Image (tube, coloured by chain):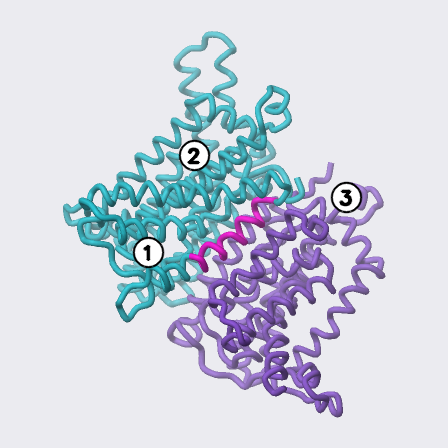
Amino acid sequence: MDELTALLASTIRNATPLAFAALGGLFSERSGVINIGLEGMMLISAFAGVAGAQGSGSTVFGLLVALAVGLLFGLVHAVASITFEADQIISGIAINLLALGGTGLLMVLFFGSGGTSPRIEPFSRIDIPLLADIPIVGAIFSQSVLVYLLYALVPITWWVLYRSRFGLRLRAVGEVPEAVDTAGVNVFRLRYIGVGLSGMLAGLGGAFLSMSLLSAFTEGMTNGRGFIALAALIFGRWNPVGAFAAALLFGFAQAVVFRGGIGFTVPQEFIEMFPYLLVIVALVGFGGRAVPPAASGQPYRKE
Amino acid sequence: MSGDEIEEVDEAEGRRSIGEILREQVVAAGRALIFPAVALAIALLVGVVVILITGNSVIEAYAALLRGGFGSRQALGRTISNATPLIFTGLAVAIPFRGGLFNIGGEGQLFIGAIAGVWIGLTMPGPGPLVAFVAIIVAGLAGWIWGAIPGLLKIWGAHEVITTIMLNFIGINLTFWLAKNPLSGEGAVPGTGFVPEGVRLTRLGGGLGAAHYGFVLGIVAAIVAYILIWRTTKGYELRTVGQAPGAARYAGMSVAANSFLAIALGGMFAGLGGGLESLGTFGKVSVPFISNLGFNGIGVALLGRNHPAGVVLGAIFFGGLAAGAQQMQFSTGVPLDLADVLLAIVLLFVTATKLVEYLLGRRARTFAAGTRLEKGLAG
């Protein structure tokens, strides 16, 4: 029983950064801009959150800094790939390298040396009264504030995407930008918003890593999570609920690794391959093929 | 996607004076360099800002960077040592690119090649040079297989950008498992044991430090790649499929077969690069192993406009940047991470069609050839 509770709690903790970043990827890719830079946006925000909290003494202020920096990196991707028509994939890879090098550089400038930053006061765990007392399931309701934010963001994202006018336009811009343009809606603005939101959400994922899951920044701490988030997005068929479910599945796999297996022993390396293998399976079409938004990857040129 | 192929098409247009041809060649070369030049200029400017923020002299820092990359035999040795795998991972991007595919899987293909090479190096009996020869071949084969997987998946409708990203992590984890389990060494550091001394690649010598003959093989590989892609019928097909898949299909060429060939070849080069790293530079595969060479190969290929000669130059440039950054940190205190930042900025802008257009006028748009694939993920 305790083991199950701990496993569930760990699953949610590990799924949260993946889910934030996957929701981020969703806004970008649904607007027609591929975002391979999620990893970098997470990493730089993980640093920014800690630096902000360290500098101001306030964890909440740190989170705001993380969001702002995530937005900034989103906008870098947007300027390069939307305005300057740079290749979206290459721009995303550049964002990742920029964050990797940039955090290394900033660690030295801010904290005097690379490696791990000084500790900060992390977001505290909040138990929801009554709900947190339920056996096993209670683990869902005994989490960091940021996790509750995620619980709210999943349905909100679904509603925005499928029920709001903005969402309709965003999806249309990712499929047939010409039609949206003809209807008098600004394609570039929509894509900027999509990629900007993407940066902020990935930033939330990064901030969760350094300010909730852990309480310091370590160089390279995202450790491929941005790519697992991309995998969750694809496996979840570019749908917020699907992406969240996939993030939970991959979070479970990580929880199993960190908790040293559940009865049977599969080498850690094979469990870590699991999300990536699933994506390939999804792409070649078992259980309905995963098809990306039609216009993703192409810069839009007004004729 | 026209531009730098113009000279080949124009040759049918009758006799021209040598002066005209020369002029055209110079113009074409100039155009080819515009994108890398703009990207580099922006990167160096950002570098100036960063160096000023750290409170250092820009001239001193950049001088140290240059000295550390090319200023002495030792520096040159480090640069060559860094450049060697990058030539291969650069080719691993450039060749599929010419066939219309974007190979982001260089990282995984390099790991698989590295572990395959060490596997032969550790287990095959026989004289050292023979074992090394077989090990390098097997590394290339293993990379070929790891590149062929996204080639096959592409035929089944999965886009290579996503599959190669996923296969990177699968390949890296598989390599780690192999290095920690069946091929595990005795040492305290996790990973394989060292391959016998006789199997390791000979160093170049002449005060060049750790630089080994892999660099020479890299130059040979670039020449082979050039001949294969630009001077054979198969290569012509591959480029046609890359530039105009519709026309290629109409002419009876198989798009699927050529795409497969392009990315498998790319995988082979990355695998060779991995084998040379593990057999030459390190003598083993440790966990964690060297990383980011595959991703940096993308920058090398793009800076070199996906041409083998450009790839070699790009690799030497990036290799020198990494070597120089150490010197820069040592003598001025500017963190060596600046090199990664500069590299990232080059990547960010090296395909920026519109940026060059803003800076140099609309005519510049045609210069974009060789730096981008004009199609999306769903295409």
**Up-down: is A3 above or below A271?**
below
Q: What is the C-alpha distance between the residues marked 3 and 2? A: 34 Å
Q: Which residue is mark 3?
A: A176
Q: Are marks 3 and 1 in contact (CB under 8 Å)?
A: no
- Which residue is drawn at the image coordinates 26% and 50% (left, top)? B280
The picture places residue A100, in percent across and down from the top left corner, at 46, 62
**Residue furthest top as drawn:** B15
Q: Does residue B161 belong to the magenta stretch?
A: yes
**Up-down: is B15 above or below B65?**
above
Q: Which residues are magenta?
A: B159-174
Q: Which residue is mark 2?
A: B307
Task: Please name the color used to draw chain A.
Answer: purple
Q: Are marks 1 and 2 in contact (CB under 8 Å)?
A: no
Q: Quadrant of the C terminus of chain A?
A: top right
- Which residue is drawn at the image coordinates 73% and 53% (left, top)? A189
What type is the residue that disc 2 sits on?
His
- Which residue is drawn at the image coordinates 82% and 59% (left, top)? A162
Which numbered tag is attached to residue B373? none
Q: What is the C-alpha distance between the residues marked 3 and 1? A: 50 Å
- Which residue is drawn at the image coordinates 43% and 54% (left, top)? B342
Subunit under mark 2:
B
Type of secondary structure dominating the magenta stretch: helix
Which numbered tag is attached to residue B59? 1
Q: Please, what secondary structure does the residue beneath circle 3 have?
A: loop
Subunit under mark 1:
B
